[in-house]
Amino acid sequence: MLRSMYSGISGMKNFQTKLDVIGNNIANVSTAGFKKGRVTFQDMMSQTTTAAQGATANRGGVNASQVGLGSQLGSIDNIQTQGFRQTTNIPLDLSIQGDGMFILQSGTETFYTRAGNFYLDEDGSIVNPDGYFLTGADGNEITIPPTAQSFNIQSDGVVNYIDENGDNQEAGTIVLANFANPAGLEQAGSNLFLTTPNAGDENRGIPDADGRGSLVSGSLEMSNVDLAEEFTEMISAQRGFQANTRIITTSDEILQELVNLKR
């Protein structure tokens, strides 16, 4: 069988994966805290027909002759650039101006997220839409008493509230985490990430320190997906897919001609 046919098949599979990633990016264009994906390709192994030869006293060197056998998936990268900030004027909507991530706790499991749409549960604890607790400086959840008259969250993570007597009280301090390689975090769905060995150690601390960034209350970080870029990549992937199908079609026509030689 022709090697070009299998090369075309590998190219089709790779461009299909790229279209899958692009489709997911576009689907999450309005998802708070979403980080887009990017696909890279690599060439597959090559078949050597003639090995390279060094120069001799009577003849110069000769390069190797190799035929490539298609492409393969190189990586699916998680692009951790910052999305634009949308003002909501809701006090529990928080965005991070910097590289940090919110730390969420669910039992013994720890999650990380850039989506800052938080809420108060019936006990006054700050939680995300799935009910996971926002972690404070002491490692516990941050709770605002239901009897509080009002509250505010400062850029350094300090949560203050006015109690029933009109006195100013501190509910706790929101901490953030950053990683040496945030692209190494594993996506867990629901805007959540899990740590992996390649992400590096968690560097936990208060905002405005060690590059973790500051908090902006009343705003949300939106997706970092650029629709114009995604549509351009989608057109490129579509044409690449079509070109690879043409390789298969042409290879099939050549094989048909070979079969018809006997006639």
Image (tube, rainbow, N blue to C red):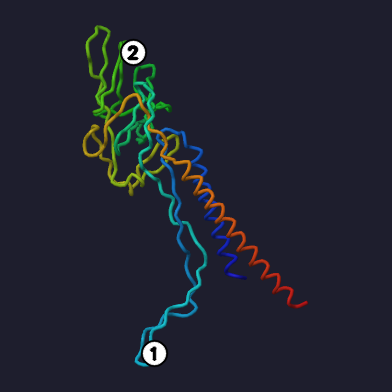
Measure how far apart labels 2 and 1 are at the Cα level. 89 Å
Residue at the spot of label 2: 146
Judging depth in this view, the residue of 228 and 151 nearest the camera is: 228
The quarter in which the C terminus is drawn is bottom right
**Residue 97, image x, y percentages:** 30, 34
Q: Which amino acid does label 1 sit on?
A: Arg
Residue at the spot of label 1: 59
Q: Please determine whether, in this image, residue 229 is positioned above or below residue 1.
A: above
Judging depth in this view, the residue of 139 and 26 nearest the camera is: 26
**Residue 95, image x, y percentages:** 34, 30
Q: What residue type is labelled 2?
A: Pro
Can you tell which quarter of the image residue 157 is in? top left
The quarter in which the N terminus is drawn is bottom right
> Of discs 2 and 1, which sits in the foreground?
1
Can you tell which quarter of the image residue 105 is in? top left
Judging depth in this view, the residue of 76 and 30 nearest the camera is: 30
Q: Looking at this view, name the residue that lies furthest to the bottom.
A: 58
| Residues under numbered marks 2 and 1 in contact, where contact means CB atoms less than 8 Å apart | no
Q: Earlier in the sequence, mark 2 or mark 1?
A: 1
